[in-house]
Image (spheres, helix red, strand yellow):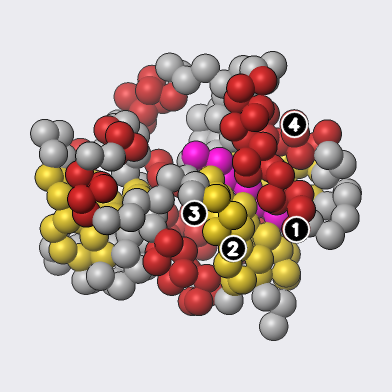
């Protein structure tokens, strides 16, 4: 594993980071991504079974309030209504897309299990939002490259995922206990991506980041 490529930046500079009772974790020395041992990744069937345990009700006010922490900052940076967006990894209850649509945007949804219509991945969007999904990406370089291809010039990425800080904090972090969570981002990880791919970066909350692509 120490000689393997980082699943995000693909650089071979990974070192052991942490071990718990279920799996090992490694950290990329280039982009700071922490990732679980890929040998411990769930099968697609087991992963889907975990997702089906989630209760994401479109009428759940608590869930709506939770998603507002992403929707609110995103809507603030969008210059107008009627823009095209993609809720990537929308899950079984695409409430985020519904909220953004209610605010006047036009939002498509995609999810490998619950909304696998590949036609929505064949056009470009003014914005892409991803709520509590990026931590599930086994090979996040693939999804990131896809997002870059789907964004229109000057487009916006809005991502919700809890960010790790230090090794000590990671050791007792509940977020890593979910077996479907395999890729863990830090502020430095997003800084690396923003610098590499020409984004303006704004950490609007402890678990929300907005990246706006520079046109030039």
Numbered mark located on residue 143 in the image? 3
Secondary structure state at the residue bearing disc 2 = strand
Q: Main secondary structure of the magenta part?
A: strand
How many other residues sit within 10 Å of disc 2, few (<14), some (14-19) or many (≥20)? some
Write down the region rendered in magenta: 125-132
Q: Visible in this render: residue 126?
A: no
How many other residues sit within 10 Å of disc 3, few (<14), some (14-19) or many (≥20)? some
Marks 3/2: CA distance?
Answer: 20 Å
Q: Does the magenta run of residues contain 73?
A: no
Marks 4/2: CA distance?
Answer: 24 Å
Query: Sequence order check: which comes first, mark 3 or mark 1?
Result: 1
Secondary structure state at the residue bearing disc 3 = helix
Query: Sequence order check: which comes first, mark 3 or mark 2?
Result: 3
User: Seen in the image, is 138 located left or right of residue 156?
Assistant: left
Marks 3/1: CA distance?
Answer: 23 Å
Residue carrying label 4: 98
The x and y percentages for residue 86 are 68, 46
Numbered mark located on residue 202 in the image? 2
User: Seen in the image, is 105 located left or right of residue 137?
Assistant: right
In the depicted structure, whether residue 203 falls above or below residue 100: below
């Amino acid at each position: 594993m120490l000689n393997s490529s980082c699943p995000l930046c693909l650089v071979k500079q990974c070192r052991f980071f942490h071990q718990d009772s279920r799996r090992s974790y490694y950290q990329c020395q280039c982009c700071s991504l922490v990732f679980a041992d890929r040998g411990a990744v769930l099968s697609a069937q087991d992963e889907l079974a975990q997702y089906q345990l989630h209760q994401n009700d479109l009428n759940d006010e608590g869930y709506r309030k939770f998603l507002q922490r992403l929707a609110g900052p995103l809507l603030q940076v969008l210059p107008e209504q009627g823009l095209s967006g993609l809720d990537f990894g929308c899950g079984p209850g695409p409430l985020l897309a519904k909220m953004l649509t209610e605010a006047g945007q036009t939002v498509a949804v995609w999810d490998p299990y619950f909304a696998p219509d590949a036609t929505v991945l064949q056009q470009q969007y003014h914005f892409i939002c991803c709520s509590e999904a990026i931590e599930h990406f086994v090979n996040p370089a693939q999804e990131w490259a896809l997002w870059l291809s789907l964004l229109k010039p000057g487009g916006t990425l809005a991502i919700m995922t809890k960010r790790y800080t230090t090794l000590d904090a990671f050791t007792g972090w509940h977020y890593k206990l979910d077996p479907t969570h395999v890729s863990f981002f830090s502020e430095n990880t997003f800084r690396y991506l923003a610098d590499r791919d020409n984004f303006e970066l704004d950490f609007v909350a402890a678990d929300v980041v907005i990246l706006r692509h520079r046109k030039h």
